């Protein structure tokens, strides 16, 4: 009985350690040199004179625990392909990048020529860099959407939504 309780305790401690260790707070590469955990100010300075970018901010008025979801979107050229880039910040840290284009096959070819990993099929997700989740999907009218996500920040956001949303 004591041995079983000891194994149960050890298993619980290891599970908690593993869950905590997997939620790294170090940056991971997202799209085109953007890194997770970058601030909106840092990204604004990188975007520089790329034209007019739209921003939309959602905040929880209760303020505790904090919740800020900022989106920035605008025209962008990725690997020579024109499209629309959407950046999502959770509590002032870059969490996700979405790039939408009508020229998805050309972007996939460009990524492969640059030796970037690309999922074999639309909808499939792969892990790139440290932990970035990357996938692409084909949406209406032949548009392609490419998505880079930091699962650590996404997990924080999901946890907040489950508890307080």
Image (tube, rainbow, N blue to C red):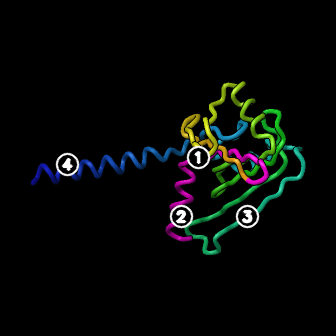
Q: Quadrant of the N terminus?
A: bottom left
Quote the CA–CA distance across marks 1 and 4: 33 Å
The crowding category of the residue bearing disc 3, from other C-alpha atoms within 10 Å (few below 14, some 14 to 19, many at least 20), is few
Q: Nearer the viewer, residue 46 or 163?
A: 163
Precedes in sequence: disc 2 or disc 3: 3
Residue 29: x and y in percent read 63, 38
User: Residue visible at 82% across and 37% down?
Assistant: 81
Which residue is labeled 2 in the image? 160
Quote the CA–CA distance across marks 2 and 4: 32 Å
The crowding category of the residue bearing disc 2, from other C-alpha atoms within 10 Å (few below 14, some 14 to 19, many at least 20), is some
Residue 84: x and y in percent read 80, 48
Q: Quadrant of the C terminus?
A: bottom right
Is-magenta flag for residue 141? yes
Precedes in sequence: disc 1 or disc 3: 3
Label 1: element kind: loop
The crowding category of the residue bearing disc 1, from other C-alpha atoms within 10 Å (few below 14, some 14 to 19, many at least 20), is many
Q: Nearer the viewer, residue 116 or 61?
A: 116
Label 4: element kind: helix
Q: Which residues are magenta?
A: 140-165
Which residue is labeled 3 in the image? 57
In the rendered structure, the answer to whether residue 35 lies left or right of residue 126 reads: right
The label number, if any, that marks residue 150 in the structure image: 1
Q: How many marks?
A: 4
Label 2: element kind: helix
Which residue is labeled 4 in the image? 7
User: Residue visible at 70% across and 66% down?
Assistant: 58
């Amino acid at each position: 009985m004591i041995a079983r309780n000891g194994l149960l305790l050890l298993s619980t401690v290891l599970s908690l350690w593993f869950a905590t260790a997997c939620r790294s707070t170090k940056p991971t590469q997202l799209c085109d040199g953007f890194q997770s955990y970058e601030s909106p100010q840092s990204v604004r300075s990188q975007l520089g004179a790329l034209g007019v970018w739209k921003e939309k901010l959602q905040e929880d008025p209760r303020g505790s625990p904090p919740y800020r979801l900022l989106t920035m979107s605008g025209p962008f050229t990725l690997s020579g392909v024109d499209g629309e880039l959407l950046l999502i910040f959770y509590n002032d840290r870059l969490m996700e990048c979405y790039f939408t284009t009508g020229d998805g096959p050309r972007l996939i070819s460009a990524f492969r020529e640059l030796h970037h990993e690309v999922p074999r099929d639309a909808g499939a997700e792969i892990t790139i860099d440290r932990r970035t989740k990357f996938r692409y999907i084909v949406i209406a009218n032949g548009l392609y959407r490419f998505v880079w996500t930091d699962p650590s920040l996404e997990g924080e956001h999901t946890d907040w939504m489950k508890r307080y949303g």
